[in-house]
Image (cartoon, rainbow, N blue to C red):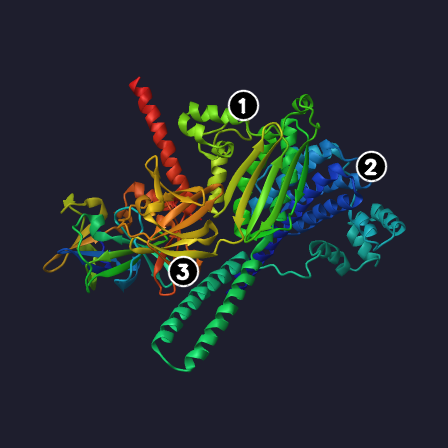
Amino acid sequence: MNDNSILQLVTFKLENDEFGVDILKVQEINRMMNITKIPNAPDFIEGVINLRGKIIPIVDLRKKLGFPSKEYDKATRIIVIELEGIVLGFVVDSVSEVLRIPRNTIEPPPSIIRGIESEFIEGVGKLEDRLLILLELKKIFTPAEHKSMETMDIN
Amino acid sequence: MSNQALENEEMREIINDFIVETNELIENAIQDIVALENNEDDDIINSIFRAVHTIKGTSSFLGFNVLSSLAHKSEDLLGLVRKKELFINKDIADALLEAMDLMRLLVDDIKTDYREKQDTKEIIEKLERLSNPDKKMLGEILVEEKIITKQELESVLEKQKAANKKLGEIIVEEKLITENQLENILTRQKTKKDDQTVRIDVKKLDEMMNLVGELVLGKNRLNMVKNTVKRDAKNTTIDSLEEVTNYIEVITNELQLSIMKARLVPLSKLFNKVPRLVRDLCNTFNKEIDLKITGEETELDRSLIESLHDPLIHIIRNSVDHGIETIEERKKRNKPEKGSLTINAYNEGNNVVIDVTDDGKGIDLDAIRKKVLEKSLISEAELADMTEKDVMNLIFIPGLSTAKKISNVSGRGVGMDVVKTNIERMNGQVYIDSKKNQWTKISIKLPLTLAIMGALIVEIGKELYAIPLNNVIELVKLKKEAIKSVDKNEVLMLRNEIVPILDVSRIMSLKEDGSDRYLVICKIGEKILGIKVKSVVGQEEIVIKSLGEFMGNIKGIGGASIRGDGKVILILDIPAMISSRYMEKINKRREEAQEYRYAV
């Protein structure tokens, strides 16, 4: 990570931490909407929503990353992200801003950060007065879950 | 776009057309060859000949020389059959079928990367051995088509010997036909009876189907809005709103129906492959079978036809391999030497039924009983309670194959359960009926289309769910006193019939609050069950949407739909629920048996 290219990130909050994802992966950001619960689904799947006629699964990022759950409020947002052809929505506490930071200010992740397994973390960005955790959403799903994403298909 | 790119684009289109056409020709030729064996008819020979000839012509035009020369050799052999210099026999038919299969593989190669990778040497030698390779065919076609006379052809052939040119060239030079005519002969063969139809890319049809689906949702929404407005306002314009809404509803329904119909394909598309399959199987197992197919004009949604292919083939293989006996066995049992296999398709309401019946040895119930006990798939007590039909239908549980010998065709124990799963995935059902030593009948029941269906919208727990209407037979009010308990399971006595009650909220790990007021009675095959619901919202046409690859495989959920208000509702997968409950029991027995074994 030595180059000076600029990385554009969408930053959001969970609990008191600030996270960022590559803006190119983000399709859109929505306000909270009516989520239909799916029984028997994995715990971190909140349910599904109707996104303009398409049904997309919603992942509760708090649950997935091991934060305590929290009631949804006015600030709650759904970040819609495309991961290898699959569109997913991620529930976050709030979306803060779009940041441009040079790639070389990002450092590789320390081995463990507050319980979040470091494999989800692409790196840590140092801003003037705070730290930003860059998530690698592709890795958010354990290998087993990832595999089941490919093999599950009702058609 | 540059000129070259344009050319490539055009070329690709031409090749794609070629692939579609050639596949069709090969398919037709295969059916004809099989038919030819039973009935040596000149028309059939000519039709095969024309197909192969067209393949030869178009493939060489496009530079697919391997395919072209294979077609050429097949054509040579067919030419001799046509001239009655050779008579069709098993060797010839086998060689021709083999050549057709290889052609199909070559077309697949071309489809993948425009390169022909199959090795045709062996089959070409075989064809050459069977035929006499030094005949020219074009002249004969021209005579056949009555474009030139036999005498004219002979004189041209004389000239050809002297001039050492291609026959076509000479005929054109002699002005017997024009160049256009020569080309027309090829094109005419391509486009036979296509006047009434247009080929449409399946993608476009799918797109239309999706759009109509959206339209249905829009219509539902409009209806909802109309009803709200009607409640609130006292205005005369409301009448015209109602009128318009009704009109749109009617039109939408009709549009939906006609687009759905456009996607229907006759079953013959699938059934046409069966004679060939049965013929090959008969060869492998040394059996003789009389195959009867009826109702091939019955229509079914395209996508269903595709997914039906594997299960149907499997059922037929099973019938030929395990069902119908060998000639010797049949003689011993005083049955006609030739076995009979009947495939019959017909419409039943909004469903299509396909029956596959053989007059073989039937299902051996004792063998099944023995096997399930041996594998501890079910307990003895449970088995004793089962009717004969229930026992028969046990052949659909995984891991059960009663075939004594494992052949390369069937009998690996991964058969009928896969058939069942595949058919249930299409919202269909499959049952078996049989009489020992006399016959076996396997019936497949499928809905006409997958994309849109009628559903009952019900409330379970705090959410709304959709139950496919074709599963529902009636709706009863739940009275506490009518519910009895049998073996810890709740049942309802309904007009002398015992209906087991399924508590969906428990299966789906939802919280229940004991306020269920209705029971939706569903019937799947022979099985009947009641589903507890809190309230019934009504009947709606719903558009089935997949939950997506990410979470498509959740037990008991068959998909989702979007209601008029934009909210997502889940569709209950009743067959899966029954089988999951059923399977749980079976699995439990299996575990118990295993524990017991360890303990001893």
* Residue type, label 1: Lys
Residue B340's tag is none
| Chain where mark 3 sits | B
Could you say which is closer to the camera, residue B293 or residue A94? B293
Q: Position of residue B114 (x, y in %)?
A: 56, 48
Q: Position of residue B272 (x, y in %)?
A: 64, 44
Left or right position of B255 against B41? left
> Judging from the image, what secondary structure is the residue with disc 1 in?
loop
- State whether discs 2 and 1 lie on one chain: yes
Q: Which of marks 2 and 1 is nearer the N terminus?
A: 2
Could you say which is closer to the camera, residue B415 or residue A95? B415
Q: Is residue B507 above or below residue A28?
A: above
**How far is disc 2 from disc 1 in space, using C-alphas?**
44 Å
The residue depicted at 48 percent of the width and 30 percent of the height is: B413
* Residue type, label 2: Glu
Q: How crowded is mark 3: few (under 14 residues within 10 Å), some or many (20 or more)?
A: few
Label 3 close to label 2 by CB (< 8 Å): no
Residue under circle 2?
A: B85
Residue B405's tag is 1
Residue B538's tag is 3
Q: Where is residue B38 in the image (x, y as percent from the top left)?
A: 75, 37
Disc nearest the viewer among 3 and 2 = 3
Q: Is residue B43 above or below residue B130?
A: below
In the image, farthest residue toward the top:
B600
